[in-house]
């Protein structure tokens, strides 16, 4: 699985925000890394599961292999979760001497496991840091492992996926916003330039602050953070549309199309309540009156090329119909969110 990093080297590491499938790799870069991966596993005669992590220079084809894991790891679990491809199951079959063409794809029931997953959605993974619980702990994020958990969100656009992911990191985070988690305030001597240059657990909020207050352009933020402009333009789109909604709300000129685009960009009812200065209950009631509800989609590994038989589902406003039929009765299992320091 290839993926894009919100990092200057596009570094394949689970300690940083990342999304899949890759959004910023060129066709040449993608196939170069893919061919390298095949050469590596053939060189070491690896049969089963293997994940290779790269660091790719953002302005050349120079790359380094950070590590090779010929086993199931956290990166393997993430790739399997993001693509719906059952890596552990397939690896066990291969270890028993069964070839890929002989293994049936449990998702489609008609194809084999000898294929590369094709995705028609975006996944975003964000680590969970609890650095504020430890006094005098540096907030800088580097090569040392500091996260205590992680989350993964799924959407049809990067904006939708990212905002869903940010909300999952902590109940106090509403999405891509400049407000700091847990009600923390910016210090009086806050240096935005330093906040952007130094990777930290709050830098995503600093970027939003710079865009919200028109303190920096995308190119300036790119120069200080070295984050790919593709990601920055997506973040700016969220900020710009929030400003548009505020103006439309003040003039009472919002339409169903405006609300629909807001939901497609990942805005929650709570966020819209803050934009329009209305209670969440009123926002939700108005949204339902417009007939705006999310659609349930399936993770099918084949980008809807074949019928899918799986209960791996996600919700998205970027759709026109459900992938599954619903009855009046059902069971919803609620997760506890990412692991954090101090859980009961």
Image: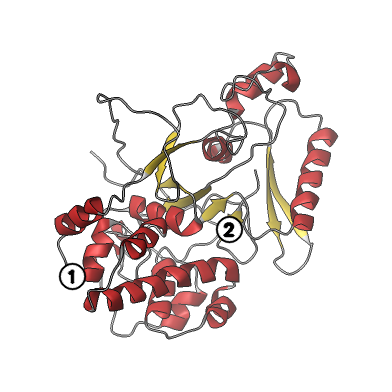
Q: Residues within 10 Å of mark 1 (few under 14, many from 20)?
A: some
Q: Nearer the viewer, residue 69 or 275?
A: 275
Q: Is residue 163 left or right of residue 106?
A: left
Locate the C terminus and report the quarter of the image it occupies.
Answer: top left
Rendering quarter of residue 255: bottom left
Q: Position of residue 294 (x, y in %)?
A: 35, 46
Label 2's element? strand
Residue marked by disc 2: 5
Residue 193: mark: none
User: In the image, residue 88 lies at what x, y percent?
Assistant: 59, 25
In the image, what residue occupies the spot 22% across and 70% down? Answer: 276
Identify the image's colour scheme: rainbow, by chain, secondary structure or one colour.
secondary structure
| Secondary-structure class at tag 1 | loop
Q: Is residue 266 left or right of residue 173?
A: right
Mark 2: few/some/many CA within 10 Å (<14, 14-19, 20+): many
Instruction: Point out the tag, 1 or 2, that comes first from the N-terminus.
Output: 2
Q: Is residue 182 visible?
A: no
In the image, residue 10 sits, relative to residue 229, either above or below, namely above
In the picture of the structure, the residue carrying the numbered disc 1 is 277
Labels in figure, total:
2
């Amino acid at each position: 699985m290839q993926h894009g990093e919100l990092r200057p080297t596009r570094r394949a590491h689970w300690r940083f925000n990342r999304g899949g499938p890759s959004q910023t790799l060129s066709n040449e870069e993608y196939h170069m890394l893919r061919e390298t991966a095949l050469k590596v596993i053939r060189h070491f005669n690896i049969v089963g599961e293997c994940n290779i992590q790269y660091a790719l220079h953002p302005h050349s084809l120079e790359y380094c292999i950070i590590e090779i894991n010929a086993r199931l790891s956290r990166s393997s679990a993430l790739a399997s979760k993001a693509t719906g491809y059952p890596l552990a199951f397939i690896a066990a079959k291969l270890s028993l001497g069964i070839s890929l063409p002989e293994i049936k794809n449990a998702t489609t029931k008609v194809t084999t496991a000898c294929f590369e997953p094709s995705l028609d959605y975006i996944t975003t993974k964000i680590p969970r840091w609890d650095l504020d619980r430890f006094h005098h702990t540096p907030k800088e994020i580097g090569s040392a492992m500091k996260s205590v958990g992680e989350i993964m969100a799924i959407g049809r656009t990067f904006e939708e996926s990212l905002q869903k992911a940010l909300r999952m990191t902590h109940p106090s985070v509403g999405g891509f916003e400049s407000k700091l988690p847990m009600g923390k305030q910016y210090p009086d001597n806050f240096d935005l330039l330093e906040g952007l240059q130094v990777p930290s657990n709050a830098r995503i909020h600093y970027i939003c602050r710079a865009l919200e207050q028109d303190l920096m352009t995308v190119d300036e933020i790119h120069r200080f953070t070295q984050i790919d402009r593709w990601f920055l333009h997506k973040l700016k789109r969220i900020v710009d549309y929030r400003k548009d909604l505020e103006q439309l709300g003040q003039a009472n000129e919002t339409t169903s199309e405006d609300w629909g685009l807001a939901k497609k960009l990942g805005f929650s009812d709570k966020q819209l309540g803050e934009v329009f200065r209305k209670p969440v209950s009123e926002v939700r009631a108005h949204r339902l009156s417009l007939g705006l509800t999310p659609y349930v989609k399936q993770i099918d590994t084949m980008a809807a090329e074949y019928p899918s038989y799986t209960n791996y589902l996600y919700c998205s406003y970027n759709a026109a119909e459900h992938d599954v039929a619903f009855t009046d009765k059902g069971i919803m299992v609620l997760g506890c969110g990412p692991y954090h320091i101090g859980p009961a």
